[in-house]
Amino acid sequence: MSIITTSGLTMQFGAQRALDSLNVDVQSGVTGLVGANGAGKTTLMSLVLGLRAPTAGQTRVLGLDPRTRGAELRAQIGYGPERNVVPEDMPAADFVKHMAEVRGMPRNEARGRASDALWLVGLGEERARALGTMSTGQRQRVKLAQAIASDPALLLLDEPTDGLDPVQRDEMLSLIRQVSREYGIDVLLSSHLLEEVERICDHIVALDAGQLVAQGRLEDLVGDEQGVVVELAETAEQPETFNDVVSQLSESGLEIRRGEAASRLEVIGPDADLVADLVRDAVADADARVIRIERRRRRLEDLFSVGTR
Amino acid sequence: MNAGSTNASANNNGARSSADGTEIHDRGYRKYEGARSGVVGAVRSLVWQTIRSILGLGRPARHKVFPVIVVVIAALPAVVFLGIALLFRDLGDDSLVNYSDLFGFSVAPIMIFAAMVAPEALVRDRRDGMFSLYLSTPLTRISYVGAKALAVLSVMMIIALGPVLLALVGYTVVGDGPPGVVDWFKVFFRLTAASLVISALMAAVSMAGSSVTDRRAFASVTVILVIFGGAIVSGILIDAAEFSNSYGFLDPMGTAGEMATRILGESPDGGQALSEIDTEVVALGTAAWFAAGAGIVGYKYRKLEAT
């Protein structure tokens, strides 16, 4: 089921085009919105929330137009911003309760739900502490708690692991996954850290300089590909050996791509086992020394190198 | 209690009941299917939270000191005159101060509050990013500013209405209040209306000053400059340069005070710049200050980026 769709969505700030004719279809589950800083992730989130008017194009979120039914839509969304927005001298429980009320929880429900949300994110014992005395990791958890306390249908999290150490990052990602799986809350999570998105997301929307690079199910975008990667030793001293391997494989009808390192080749063919056999024969015939042969695996960063190639 | 009792049965509220009637409630995070309060609930929560923040409620004690001092200073004249009325009852009405004069005594506390209240209510939200977070909820720019205005107005009313209401109740208790219930309520409503005018105008000035800068200290200084500066400039123009008394409208506090005097139906003080001007014109001058303040707030918040 689509939860967010955009068509021709464009956002222009002066001379800079933050989003360029974006056609996005975000499905139910956990979706990673990935891209480098400045790719347009936060701008897309602000358009989804109806905080800005797009220069052109349409957006529908949970079946509603953010521009015309923004208040109704935002009542169903929990938002965790990238900025550190917590009021320093406010106890965590008061802050989460207040935000739950502002998002539509009746007063008598909000106190209990704030407490429940803080326990869920692991801050039950700390709920009376002032936010200004909390660590970065705890504040990130408070931001998650305030976003989920009102039981939203959709959770928008902008760089929720920003500033966290690896252990805290793992815990935060597990929490987000838990919130989605156990409570059926759809999540759109922005991050510039591709490996964390690969760990917990069902779907990916990849942006680069405001343009859509790729979108779809994670398993369709990453994983094993046809062909192998081979790394040869000492090519600088034996360039002929390297060239012999390349020519023999080319004559076999395989596609050859030079890797980032000079000694690395990507050999692409219809059957990975057959390609591996042909590489083995070519290496043996050229008397080359092999460091590594492995199956080609597509990673998220490859989406960006393809997109910008 | 034993959650695992073979006699226990679960209901759909997450509670388990046992044969002896005891219940174990599963209070974990869960889905919510009940009614939601929408924009009205959001505004109500924001108003209350803002009032709490301004008055330092739910915050460390140091945040409560300043509001308490200002409230005490504002209430002091009313308490003193009540004491005089009580101790020197044989002096009759001569010992009673009228309500306009009580408003006059509250000028300094009202000004201090105006300089403090809106910067606390508005500038903090812009500086710590809460403004953007609020706009990610059912609140819109208009409902956000409306909620903030309501909160600022409510707190200003504590200073403006509190002392005169204290005096009214005190005079009534010592037997110097309005004769009869009908007259009492007439005075009560006039005091409320006069306080509302002063509070609304000061809230508008205070919020306008707090919209033009993201530094709380600068916002406070701006508000004081407008209130003080207006009084000084109008005083110089009228007294030294002998300009028309209409320049008294440059003084926001003087304008609000004159309007309050007209609402109370008390005799205008001949020493005031606006005392000879028609009530309709004074009302227009008051409305102009209010509109100017509201216009600046509206313009600034329409342009404000939310990310």
Image (cartoon, coloured by chain):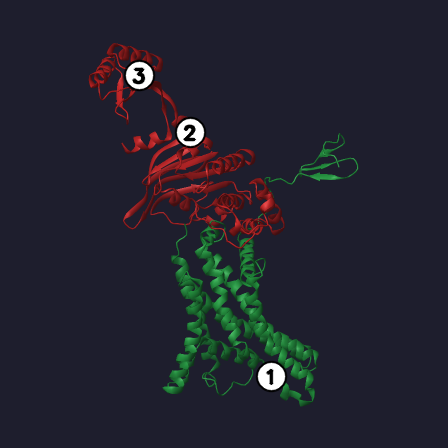
Chain colours: A red, B green
Relative to residue A242, is residue A43 depicted above or below?
Answer: below
- Reading the image, the residue beneath label 3 is A290
Residue A164 at x, y = what percent? 46, 41
Q: Earlier in the sequence, mark 3 or mark 2?
A: 2
Q: CA distance from mark 1 to mark 3?
A: 102 Å
Relative to residue A181, is residue A226 depicted above or below?
Answer: above
Chain at numbered mark 1 = B
Same chain? Circles 3 and 2: yes
Chain at numbered mark 3 = A
Q: Residue furthest left?
A: A240
Residue A121 at x, y = what percent? 55, 41
Element carrying mark 1: loop
Q: Residues within 10 Å of mark 3 (few under 14, many from 20)?
A: some
Element carrying mark 3: strand
Relative to residue B126, is residue B19 depicted above or below?
Answer: above
- Reading the image, the residue beneath label 2 is A218
- Reading the image, the residue beneath label 1 is B97
Same chain? Circles 1 and 3: no
Q: Residues within 10 Å of mark 1 (few under 14, many from 20)?
A: some
